[in-house]
Amino acid sequence: MEDRAHTITVTDLARRFGDFEAVKGVSFDVHEGELFGFLGPNGAGKTTTIRMLCTLLRPSGGKALVSGFDVVTEPMKVRRNLGIIFQDPSLDERLTAEENLLFHGLMYHLPRAVRRQRAEEMLAMVDLLDRRHDRVRTFSGGMKRRLEIARGLMHLPKVLFLDEPTEGLDPQTRTHIWEYLYKLRREANLTIFLTTHYLQEAEDCDRIAIIDHGQIIAIDTPANLKRQVGGDVVTARGPDEDGLGMEIGTRYNMPVRHDREGLHFEVENGAAFIPRLLGDFQGRITAVNLRGPSLDDVFLKLTGREIREEEAGARDILRTAARRKGKIGR
């Protein structure tokens, strides 16, 4: 992967909203044809970063190149090389599926014949060709998301930005959408930049940048990131978990985390350790579970907390900061 050309190059990129620093000088590269993920809780700086890369938000500092073009000095060239699917719906529901695509092609100055050919190809790709003349307001959430992906690919971009692309969709629809994206990536060498808090989506990335409080705290493959956890994760339950956790930590000289799901700790060989644990605390452990480390465990190890979907959304944080400076009236 390292010998591939860089489709995106980011150096010390920053964004401030008054006194609030949403992105704090991040640096990273994305390789051509790579599925690159931004993983972090809501409000971590994911959406702000992607909006700067898409030329929708001017950086407060640093530099970013997309397909070799500067996002500040060459925004139109950047836009011609990228497709965008944001978290919030952006289709015109009064138009038909085909009309949405044709209008998008018009905005990118595609010739009339090319627009119609591309619209038909894209609708067929996302299994919506038989609904081409139906108004979008009659579509399900999954169908709208598939149409947004088709629209984002109408002008053959080199980079596709996906900001929480499957937010709110059922697992079956989420799987269906990713099947299309994997196919496109293989066939067109498409570079995909993904922001997500779904751990399974992040697991499938080539590399992941973990971002928290506007800073990148780690970049690596999912497998290498999980190796940082240090072993298997054991979860134990019992009637007196507070006392049990303290005794387990003292006996084995290791940190024990206690939450609503039980006691959690890391060991090198969980299968061999569990019989010893049950013997040492006979009758005090009512249930035990063993699993390999997850990206949530990595995030917890690096930040001291878990990725929580219920955290404040990035837009709310930014709007609050802007209001303090009188930038947003309502």
Image (cartoon, rainbow, N blue to C red):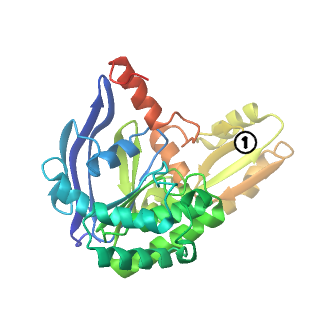
> x, y percentage for residue 207?
38, 62
> x, y percentage for residue 6?
22, 65
Q: Which residue is drawn at 79% across and 44% down?
A: 281
Query: For this rendering, which residue is in front, 271 or 54?
Result: 54
Residue 108 found in image quarter: bottom left
Q: Residue at x 29, y 23 (%)?
A: 18
Can the viewer see residue 262 in this picture? yes
Query: For this rendering, which residue is in front, 83 or 9?
Result: 83
Query: For this rendering, which residue is in front, 134 or 201?
Result: 134
Please rate how many residues cluster around mark 1, counting C-alpha atoms within 10 Å: few if below 14, some from 14 to 19, many from 20. Answer: some
The amino acid on which the numbered mark 1 sits, given as a three-letter code, is: Gly
Kindly give the residue lying farthest to the right in the view shown: 283
Secondary structure of residue under mark 1: strand
Left or right of 109, for residue 194? right
> x, y percentage for residue 112?
30, 74
Q: Which residue is drawn at 12% across and 49% down?
A: 73
Left or right of 239, for residue 246? left
- For disc 1, the marked residue is 262
Can the viewer see residue 273 in this picture? no
Query: For this rendering, which residue is in front, 131 or 318?
Result: 131
For the N terminus, the quadrant is: bottom left
> x, y percentage for residue 37?
41, 57
For the C terminus, the quadrant is: top left
Left or right of 291, for residue 187? left
Above or below residue 178? Residue 286 is: above
